[in-house]
Amino acid sequence: MMLAASLMDLLELPVLNFAENYQFRMKLSEDLPYIFCSTRKKWLLLTPEEWVRQHTVQFLIQEKNYSPSAINTEVAVGINGMRKRADILVYKKEKPLILVECKAPSITITQDTFDQIARYNLQLGADFLMVTNGLNHYYCQMDFENQKYVFLESIPSN
């Protein structure tokens, strides 16, 4: 799509560390860039974090074979009376399976990032965690009995 290619060049969006070259619908509206979210079926402001989130959604669909209907984005989570949003939650038979925290490519993933996703997961109870800034991806499996996570090479496919 010519608009998407020229828009990507204009925005200088980074190439992210995913195996596939995913195709996205993008547009400019009132001089602001938007990307179409295939799971929410709506246009979203294209921020660096949204660029990573949309790549991660496509990774889950195209490479890990999860149904788009099993994937929710920006899921509300109540933490200490505050309303937060988990970036991506993949369900399997209505149970949270994979919780994903996305950061912009310019954000370094630190222990604080893992602490954030762990706090969210106390409420959600997903079996697997993924933390990504689009360049670096970390995968964990929860060990609820010992209250820790174990790092993995990848997350399971559907």
Image (cartoon, grey):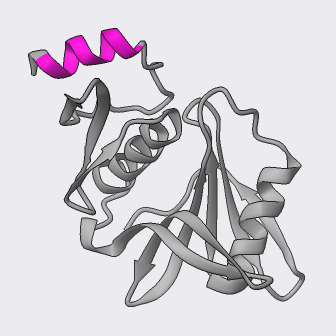
Q: Position of residue 79 (x, y in %)?
A: 74, 80
Q: Residue at x 83, y 61 (%)?
A: 115
Q: Position of residue 125 (x, y in %)?
A: 65, 84
- In the image, is residue 30 above or below residue 55? above
> From the viewer's perspective, is 105 left or right of 75?
right
> From the viewer's perspective, is 134 left or right of 12?
right
| The C terminus lies in quadrant | bottom left
Q: Residue 28 occupies which quadrant of the picture?
A: top left
Q: Residue at x 42, y 62 (%)?
A: 157
| The N terminus lies in quadrant | top left
Q: Which residues are magenta?
A: 3-11
Q: Residue 137 occupies which quadrant of the picture?
A: top right
Q: Residue 116 occupies which quadrant of the picture?
A: bottom right
> From the viewer's perspective, is 88 left or right of 133?
left
Viewer-proximal residue, 7 or 58? 7
> From the viewer's perspective, is 112 left or right of 151?
right
> Main SS of the magenta segment?
helix
Residue sticking out furthest to the left: 1
Q: Residue at x 27, y 34 (%)?
A: 22
Viewer-proximal residue, 65 or 98? 98
- In the image, is residue 35 above or below residue 126? above
Question: Does the magenta run of residues contain 4?
Answer: yes
Q: Residue at x 70, y 33 (%)?
A: 107
Q: Position of residue 120 (x, y in %)?
A: 70, 73
Q: Position of residue 66 (x, y in %)?
A: 32, 65
Residue sticking out furthest to the front: 30
Report the number of numbered marks: 0
